[in-house]
Each structure stands twice: as structure tokens, then as C-alpha cells.
Amino acid sequence: MAKIGTKEMTSGPLLLPIFRYTLPIIATGALQLLFNTADLIVVGWFCGETSVGSVGATGALNSLIINLFMGLSVGAGVEVAQALGSRNKQRVHQTVHTAIPVAIICGVIVTVIGVTFCGKFLEWMDTPEENLKLATLYMRIYFSGMVFTLLLNFGAAILRAAGDTMRPMLYLTLAGVVNVVLNVIFVTLFHMDVAGVALATVISQAVSAILILRALMKREDACKLKLREMSIHRKPLFRMIAIGVPAGIQSSLFAISNVLIQSSINSFGSVALAGSTAAANLEGYLYIVMNSFNQTVMNFAGQNTGAHNYKRIGKLYWVCLLMTTIIGFVLGGLVCLFAKPLLCLYGADSAEALHTGTVRLICICLPYFLCGILEVATGAVRGMGISLSPMIVTVLGVCGLRILWLFTLFAKHHSLEWLFVSYPISWAVTFLAISGIFFSVLHFRKKQFKKETIYSKEQL
């Protein structure tokens, strides 16, 4: 099975290895999003716009609760990548055997929070009354499977850090088929409505998680998982926390602004909510592509940081920026060009729902390459082991700017256009700031390594 080894990640040409590494990540992410797309399409066809809006109303809130803990999987991946780059097998072994029990613990915590408080959270978001009951039911079932979700993401992060992006893709393909089949069975035969699609998602995530763990257990390198040797080692845990907690906080605070925007969308009514939900799901596929380059540059930068190959990190940065700009602009344009038929796939075919969805796609998807270059910049900085400063900048540049926008310009004009345009503006501003951090960190790392090299030669 094809994979990218440490040698290809730390030396030689970049363009082809980046493509080979990134394409399976894109496919994997698209399949994960297919879980939610299948939910929405099946619900839209067989249950109506109210059920579509109920599932969509949970998206931002789900991200807010999950992302803090999911950030630790980012920390695990970076730690494994840097350890592999430095050829430290013991560090790799300890990180792998720390990450899996941490995933289980975090999954239990997220389940308790989600199941217990989801109803109250949805009320705080001003979820329309006709959507509230179904949205709460969907969330409670969805969060019951969080252990599987986190095991899947932690395990996939370890495999990708080791250069293996193919196995996660193949496992998600199988799980995606399971999800679609179960969606149809639960909704059409057992008439379970949103409960059926939530249960199908949980089962498919469990299938993926089991296959990922099996792949780790069958490896023959330092990433091999041995269940009896699972233990929480302090040093890897602290390094995972140092990188992962700021990443998780950033994602959660990022989601807070989305929760506020979701609340604003809710104020336009249930039909508009259905149109926005369908558009947001389409938008999610663009994000998968952009975020895949984030993971690529993060793991490549991580291995090259471990190998002290800083010149290659700079080249990697520019190559990924160019690729995301071109791909993001082309894909965003295609989504907008075929907006109406794509939105109708979700059952959002009324005039109001189509209008809301189209406005969102034009304002957000067309300039989506801005999100892509922001993802690249953030991934490059994290790959070098710096996570706190990107978090602070993102909180101020994305979350802060969007919240300020909501309470000033949107409050004054109160239109969908003024609401959605806050996304590309916040991406552009934040990218410029994080790009500055990247070059500062890269310069510091080069200077520090040069001093260490000179000192080592003097000692000899």
C-alpha cells in the first residue's frame, strides 16, 4: 500500500509527494463529511425541511463541544511527526501509547457533556421551536459515540504523521458505505427520522475506529500499538497538551463565532435555516480540501523540524500556499456555478431556502481560497511546535472580528449578505498575522540551530 516515508518528507522534490500525501486526506475528510451529507439528503428526501434544519442546527454546537478535545489529536500527530523526523523510536512509542488512552478518556468526557447539556445549549442558540426537539434527540444519540470519534481521529493523526494517508481513506470508504445503507434502512423502513441518521453515524464511526486501531496494532515500526503497553507517559502528554490544547481552544473559540452566526441565521426562520444548512454542508467539502493541506504542511513541517531541515519548511510553505489558492478558487467557483441543483439535492428547493443557500455560497465559497491559505499558515507554525500564538491571533482575527461584525455592521443592516461576508474578511486579516508569525518562528529556529551546531563543533 502506497505511503510517503520519512525520507520523502524530509528530502527530494516536494510537489509530487505533497499531492500523493494530500489526496487521500482529502478523500478521507470528504468521506467523513459524507456521513453528515447522507444524513441531510436522506432526511431531506423522506422527512422534510424541518428535519433538515434540525440536523443542521446542531453543526456549530457539535464543533464547539468536540473541538477542544479534538485538538489533542493534533498535538499527538505533531509529536509523532517530530519524533520520527529525529529518529527517536522511544519517543514515538510513548506518544502512541499515550494518545490512545487519552482519546478514550476525552471521548467519555465529551459524551457526558454533550448528552447532558445539549438541550439547554440549543435553547441558548435560539433554535426554532419546531426544530428543538428533533435537534436535541439527534445530538444525544450522536454524542453517545464520541469515544469512537476521538479514537478514529487520534489514530488517523498517528498514521498520517508516519506518512500513511491511504489506510484512513480506505477505512472511511467502508464506513461511509455502512453509514449510507443504515441511513436508508433506519429512516425508510423503521421511520426513525433524525434518530436513525444519528445512530447510523455512530455505528459507522465505530467501524472506522476499530479498523484504525487494528492498522496501528499490525504496524512493524515504532508506531505499532500494543494494547497491554498503553499508559499515559508524562513527557509526551505534556508535549501533546502544549500543542493540542491551544489548537483545541482555537477551534472551540472559532466555533463560538460560528454558534453566534448560527443563532443569527436562526432569526431568519426555519426555511432559511434549511437553505443555510444545505449550503454549509457544501461549504464543508471545500473546507475538507483546504484543511487537508493544513494537515499536510503540519506533518511535513513536523518531520522536517525534527530533522532540523528548516530551508525545506520555507519551500514547503510557498508550494502549499500556491496549491491551495488555485484549488480553492477553482472549487469555490464550481460550487457557485452549480448552486441551485446542488442545494436541491438536500431538499432545500423552496424559493426562500434556495435564496439563502445561494447567498451563502457566493459570499463564502467563492473566496474560500482565503480559508485555505490561512489553514496552510496555521499548520506550518504548529508543525514547528508553536501553538499558543496561532491560537491568540485566530481568536482575535477570526472570532473577535466576526463577533464585532455581528454586533455592529450586521446589527445595523441585518441581511444575509452582511452576515456571511464576515467569513472571508476574517480569513484574510488572520492569514496576514499568522504568516508573520511563521516567518518569525522559522527565522528563530534557523538561528537557534546554527548556534547549536557551532557550539557542538567547538566542543569537539
Image (cartoon, helix red, strand yellow):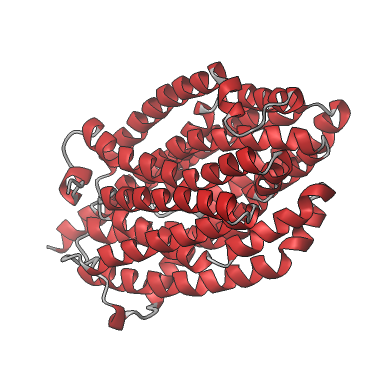
Q: Is residue 427 left or right of residue 288?
A: right
- The one nearer the camera, 328 or 268, is 268
Image position, residue 61 (x, y; %) = 67, 53
**Split into 4 quadrants, where in the image is the C terminus?**
bottom left
Image position, residue 164 (x, y; %) = 25, 51
Q: Is residue 275 left or right of residue 186?
A: right
Task: Residue lying at the far top in this picture: please name it.
Answer: 337
- The one nearer the camera, 259 or 456, is 259
Q: Is residue 406 left or right of residue 214?
A: right
Q: Residue at x 32, y 62 (%)?
A: 211
Image position, residue 15 (x, y; %) = 25, 31
Q: Is residue 455 above or below residue 402?
A: below
Q: Residue at x 33, y 61 (%)?
A: 212
Q: Residue at x 28, y 36 (%)?
A: 18
Task: Residue lying at the far right in this picture: please name it.
Answer: 412
Residue 319 location, quadrant: top left
Q: Is residue 136 above or below residue 55?
A: below
Q: Is residue 32 left or right of residue 246?
A: left
Q: Residue at x 44, y 25 (%)?
A: 325
